[in-house]
Image: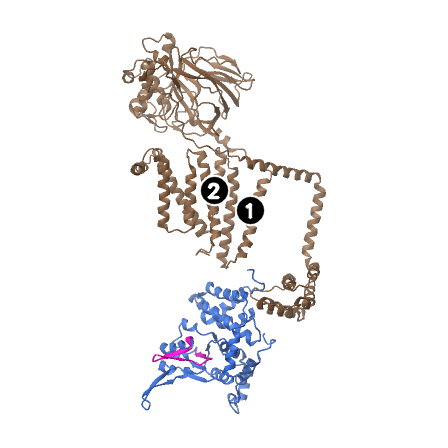
């Protein structure tokens, strides 16, 4: 059962299985680190492609099966819920054409998910061919193994992916594959015809080595890392995050200076914080009220900061306290990764709980909360924020309009401020948008929807910086029509203020990416965001989200609303489907490790108590064993003599003869591979000047080549045998 | 090396007979008897005058067999070998005149000097132990033993036997010149009377046929069969070999080893027997690569190396 490559089926299968394990390690992190879901279909595809390879199916059949699998998978993942199979097919074709044109234009972000999955399938398909080539044709896998290790370690260092298990798996599979391939390379090089026992002789030690090295590596206590974690270094190196230097490209992130907005952003994955939330909500840091035509500044700071302590109520009035808003109190926990002097909080914040040594200060203009400990701005690693989750009555919201809002003039002017040189066409546009809507609420909803209705494009890279005499909003609204959150939010505010609705600009973070189960979210610099809050009399501040691709959860109460308002459904955003991530630290493995470690510790304890004695004893034993082994020619033959004396069974003769051969070999009379026993016996007899060996050999030949042994051979021959084996003691 | 063992008495007699004629050529005589007993044929490659004919005649006389000799020439026709039907006007019918192939022991002298057509007439007879002439199948004698000779010197006007035909000879051997001492002895003996005239048959054909049957009963252990196969397989994978030994070669080696064990009075085969015969059985079945020929490697070298490298079975195979 050997194929032309000289493997037998079983070992080929084993090679394929380990090759699959190595490939698998490449897919595992993908699900955790990217927004790829359903990674199992890719794994299934790998299994199938490798199996087809293994069974050397004809390439046409293989091609049909593999591409069939890909098409079916794409259909079920992307189309089956919306379209029937035939319709899907034509849509799929269309989508392919679209993606090809996108590829030719090299607008990579525009590739659709379906096409990305398709490309990923093709990549995996190629990988199976490569694996097959490395394993079967080249019989070398080291490069791939090394790449896998590097891949895993890099991911482990720089991403949340915990590669503890992956490293162990990869090392085991890699060693196994390399060991087997080395064996087959040797066979091929030396032109050795292999037998079963030969394979066993190689594979058993190989398995033992792998188990021993992996076991020791697993159980042994781990040294602390030699080098400090490189991530903070790179982080400090990249401190420019969020800082608006004039050189052009910035990194996304939180910055304080918003006086000149615009320009491209680089994505930045640094984690700012993790939060456990009962409900999804945005995180506020500060609000700004004065639009300059280039960006945002705040009203000159003439008010005193308001200090308050842990557990005190936060002196921010978000909502008017009446029946127009139903509120329920909730709590979110924040774990800070990247230290800023301020804390983050949701709309409707009540109080902040945390280490009681801390105190806070509210900047009432910016509504920014800074934290202190004994007068210093310090790191507060974790705190809980209690807040009221509002549910707005649409009737109350719809009550306000330009004619009757009953707001304080100073307040109203502050939040409807606009620069004097704002181009007229912006104001005209605002009037055009809100035309036909009476209440502020309907108007601002029109403005919020305007951007997506008009096909404005979300883009972080190709974003213009307004020139000296350009207005930031005007440029976005009428010229570029592409930008990120700042563009959308600022433009919405300017439009709303043009229509007379009091609004302010809010900066902070979105809720981030969900990790670890249902309620924990990770906020990175990429999640820095800005959005809009509008003030409604008798209600309070309400969030709006004009930026395309983002959703903020705002609850509205429709119980009193009229029918024609039913388009303003409750805005519970559709949760993006995120795969449930496995807990990377396997708990059962952990428990296992724990006990092993305990055993190890106990052994260590005993060893440390009596280490001098035990070391001495160990040394003596080792020396004795070495000595005994080295001098075995002096005593081993006697052992054999006694050993084989115990029985007269003729079977003993066979064993005794083979032992004699071994002893003679050790004595320094090796038998050549091609030397027959008879020739060898003559050499031995010549050396010891006897005829005993030839007589013994004649009997053994009868046993071996004739298949019969005369009764009583052993008792007849034992004397000769003893003479011979004793001659080896010389 | 086998001298310590006693030989089968009848064979010993035959050998003594041959040795009366052929001085110092016991090895060659032994191999010829091996081929005869194993129901095979021998290809002798040597220069003229070293006693090829003499040996075959002595062998034939010792077993009381019918000896025929065919001297192959370029103009020899197949019918000159097999025989021909002739019309007898007295009895008004065709009568078969048997050719020289109808003997028991045939010396096919200088077989490579005749045309392939005539060669194949002989070789076909060797293979099937019958010839068909004018639609009538004539059985050949039993035992039927061909000793073909090839002259390695002359190449002009020769038709070298193709590989497929060479495979039909059980053994190929060389005679070689006698040593000086032996050659003097040869001279001494032929001075008065040709020694061939003095020898008598020691066994008859019936006994020989019985011996041939007995040889088939010689036990070949599985480990020995495995050893033979390993050897044959090694020639197939050897780096200098273009075409290795066919399974027919493995069969030939086993049969020859059985015969060899038998003439040494053993009813089982030893690896020593296999090793002793391997060269004679394998050499003419191996085709070397041309680069190996340039390096001066011979088929004998290859077989020697394989014998030294292939492990001899010294334990029962685990089944």
- The quadrant in which residue A710 appears is bottom right
What chain does mark 2 sit on? A
Classify mark 2: residues with Cα within 10 Å, few (<14), some (14-19) or many (20+): many
Question: Is residue A76 among the parts visible in the rendering?
Answer: yes
The percent position of residue A168, horizontal first and vertical second, equals 53, 41
Display colour for chain B: blue
Checking the image for residue A189, the label placed there is none
- Residue beneath the point at 69% across and 55% down: A628
Q: Locate the N terminus of chain B and report the quarter of the image it occupies.
A: bottom right
Task: Determine whether B290 is above or below A28 in the image.
Answer: below
Checking the image for residue A148, the label placed there is 2
**Which mark sits nearer the N-terminus, 1 or 2?**
2
Task: Give the magenta part as a residue range.
Answer: B127-151
Task: Determine whether A79 is above or below A511 in the image.
Answer: below
In reply to whether residue B259 is colored magenta, the answer given is no
On the picture, is A459 further left or further right than B16? left
Alpha carbon distance from label 1 to label 2: 18 Å
The percent position of residue A186, horizontal first and vertical second, equals 50, 55
The percent position of residue A670, horizontal first and vertical second, equals 61, 63
In reply to whether residue B134 is colored magenta, the answer given is yes
Display colour for chain A: brown
> Which residue corresponds to mark 1?
A210
The percent position of residue A355, horizontal first and vertical second, equals 55, 19
């Amino acid at each position: 059962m050997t194929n032309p490559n000289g493997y037998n089926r079983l070992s080929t299968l084993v090679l394929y299985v380990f090759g699959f394990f190595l490939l698998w390690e490449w897919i595992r992190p993908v699900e955790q680190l990217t927004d790829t879901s359903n990674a199992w279909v890719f794994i299934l595809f790998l299994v199938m492609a490798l199996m087809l390879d293994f069974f050397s199916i004809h390439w046409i059949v293989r091609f049909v099966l593999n591409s069939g699998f890909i098409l079916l998978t794409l259909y079920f993942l992307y189309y089956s819920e919306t379209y029937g199979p035939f319709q899907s097919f034509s849509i799929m074709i269309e989508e392919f054409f679209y993606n090809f044109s996108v590829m030719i234009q090299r607008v990579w972000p525009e590739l659709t998910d379906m096409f990305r999955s398709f490309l990923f399938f093709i990549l995996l398909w190629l990988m199976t061919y490569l694996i097959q080539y490395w394993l079967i044709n080249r019989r070398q896998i080291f490069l791939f193994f090394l790449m896998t290790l590097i891949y895993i370690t890099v991911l482990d260092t720089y991403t949340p992916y915990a590669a503890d298990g992956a490293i162990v798996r990869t090392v085991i599979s890699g060693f196994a594959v390399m060991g087997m391939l080395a064996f087959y390379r040797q066979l091929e090089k030396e032109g050795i015809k292999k037998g079963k026992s030969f394979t066993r002789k190689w594979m058993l030690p190989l398995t033992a080595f792998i188990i021993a090295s992996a076991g020791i590596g697993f159980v042994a206590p781990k040294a602390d890392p030699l080098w400090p974690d490189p991530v903070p270094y790179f982080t400090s190196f990249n401190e420019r995050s969020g800082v608006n230097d004039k050189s052009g490209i910035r990194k996304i992130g939180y910055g304080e200076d918003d006086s000149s907005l615009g320009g491209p952003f680089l994505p930045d994955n640094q984690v700012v914080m993790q939060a456990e939330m009962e409900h999804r909500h945005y995180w506020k840091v500060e609000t700004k009220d004065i639009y300059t035509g280039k960006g945002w500044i705040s009203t000159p700071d003439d008010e005193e900061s308001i200090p308050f302590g842990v557990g005190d109520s936060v002196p921010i009035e978000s909502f008017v306290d009446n029946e127009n808003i139903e509120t329920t109190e909730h709590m979110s926990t924040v774990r800070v990764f990247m230290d800023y002097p301020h804390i983050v909080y949701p709309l409707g914040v009540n109080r902040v709980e945390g280490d009681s040594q801390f105190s806070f200060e509210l900047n009432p203009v910016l509504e920014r909360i800074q934290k202190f400990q004994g007068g210093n701005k310090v790191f507060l690693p974790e705190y809980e924020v209690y807040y009221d989750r509002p549910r707005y009555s649409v009737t109350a919201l719809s009550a306000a309009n330009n004619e009757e809002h009953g707001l304080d003039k100073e307040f109203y002017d502050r939040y409807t401020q606009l620069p004097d040189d704002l181009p007229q066409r912006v104001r005209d546009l605002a009037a055009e948008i809100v035309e036909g809507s009476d209440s502020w609420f309907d108007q601002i909803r029109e403005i919020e929807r305007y951007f997506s209705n008009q096909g404005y494009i979300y883009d972080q890279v190709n974003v213009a910086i307004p020139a000296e005499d350009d207005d930031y909003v005007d440029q976005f609204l009428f010229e570029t029509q592409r930008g990120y959150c700042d563009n959308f939010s600022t433009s919405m505010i300017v439009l709303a203020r043009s229509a007379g609705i009091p609004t302010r600009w809010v900066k902070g973070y979105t809720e981030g990416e969900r990790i670890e189960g249902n309620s924990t979210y990770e906020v990175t610099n990429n999640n820095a965001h800005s959005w809009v809050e509008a003030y409604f009399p008798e209600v309070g501040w309400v969030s709006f989200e004009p930026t395309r691709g983002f959703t903020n959860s705002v609850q509205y109460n429709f119980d009193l609303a009229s029918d024609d308002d039913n388009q303003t459904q409750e805005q519970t955003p559709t949760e993006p489907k995120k795969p449930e991530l496995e807990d990377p630290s396997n708990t059962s493995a952990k428990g296992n490790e724990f006990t092993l470690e305990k055993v190890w510790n106990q052994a260590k304890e005993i060893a440390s108590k009596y280490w001098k004695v035990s070391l001495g004893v160990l040394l003596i034993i080792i020396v004795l064993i070495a000595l005994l082994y080295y001098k075995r020619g002096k005593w081993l033959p006697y052992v054999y003599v006694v050993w084989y004396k115990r029985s007269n069974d003729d079977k003993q003769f066979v064993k005794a003869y083979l032992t004699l051969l071994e002893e003679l070999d050790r004595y320094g009379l090796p038998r050549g591979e091609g030397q027959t026993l008879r020739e060898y016996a003559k050499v031995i007899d010549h050396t010891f000047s006897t005829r005993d060996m030839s007589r013994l050999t004649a009997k053994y030949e009868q046993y071996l080549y004739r298949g019969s042994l005369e009764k009583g051979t052993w008792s007849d021959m034992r004397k000769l045998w003893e003479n011979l084996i004793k001659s080896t003691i010389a | 090396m086998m001298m310590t063992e006693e030989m089968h008495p009848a064979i010993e007699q035959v050998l003594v007979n041959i040795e009366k004629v052929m001085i110092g050529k016991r090895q060659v005589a032994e191999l010829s008897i091996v081929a005869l007993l194993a129901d095979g044929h021998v290809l002798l490659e040597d220069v003229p005058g070293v006693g090829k004919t003499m040996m075959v005649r002595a062998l034939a006389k010792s077993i009381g067999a019918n000896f025929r000799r065919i001297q192959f020439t370029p103009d020899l026709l197949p019918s000159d070998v097999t025989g021909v039907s002739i019309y007898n006007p007295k009895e008004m019918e065709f009568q078969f005149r048997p050719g020289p192939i109808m003997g028991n022991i045939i010396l096919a002298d200088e077989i490579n000097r005749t045309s392939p057509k005539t060669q194949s007439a002989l070789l076909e007879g060797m293979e099937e132990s019958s010839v068909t002439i004018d639609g009538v199948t004539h059985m050949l004698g039993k035992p039927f033993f061909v000793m073909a000779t090839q002259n390695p010197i002359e190449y002009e006007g020769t038709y070298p036997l193709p590989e497929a035909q060479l495979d039909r000879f059980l053994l190929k051997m060389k005679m070689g010149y006698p040593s000086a001492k032996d050659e003097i002895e040869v001279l001494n003996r032929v001075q008065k009377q040709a020694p061939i005239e003095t020898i008598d048959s020691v066994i008859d054909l019936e006994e020989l046929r019985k011996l041939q049957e007995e040889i088939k009963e010689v036990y070949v252990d599985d480990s020995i069969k495995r050893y033979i196969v390993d050897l044959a397989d090694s020639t197939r994978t050897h780096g200098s070999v273009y075409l290795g030994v066919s399974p027919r070669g493995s069969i030939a080696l086993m049969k020859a080893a059985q015969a060899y064990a038998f003439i040494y009075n053993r009813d089982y085969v030893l690896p020593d027997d296999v090793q002793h015969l391997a060269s004679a059985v394998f050499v003419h079945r191996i085709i070397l690569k041309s680069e190996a020929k340039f390096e001066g490697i011979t088929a004998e070298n290859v077989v020697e190396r394989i014998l030294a490298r292939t492990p001899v079975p010294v334990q029962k195979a685990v089944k």
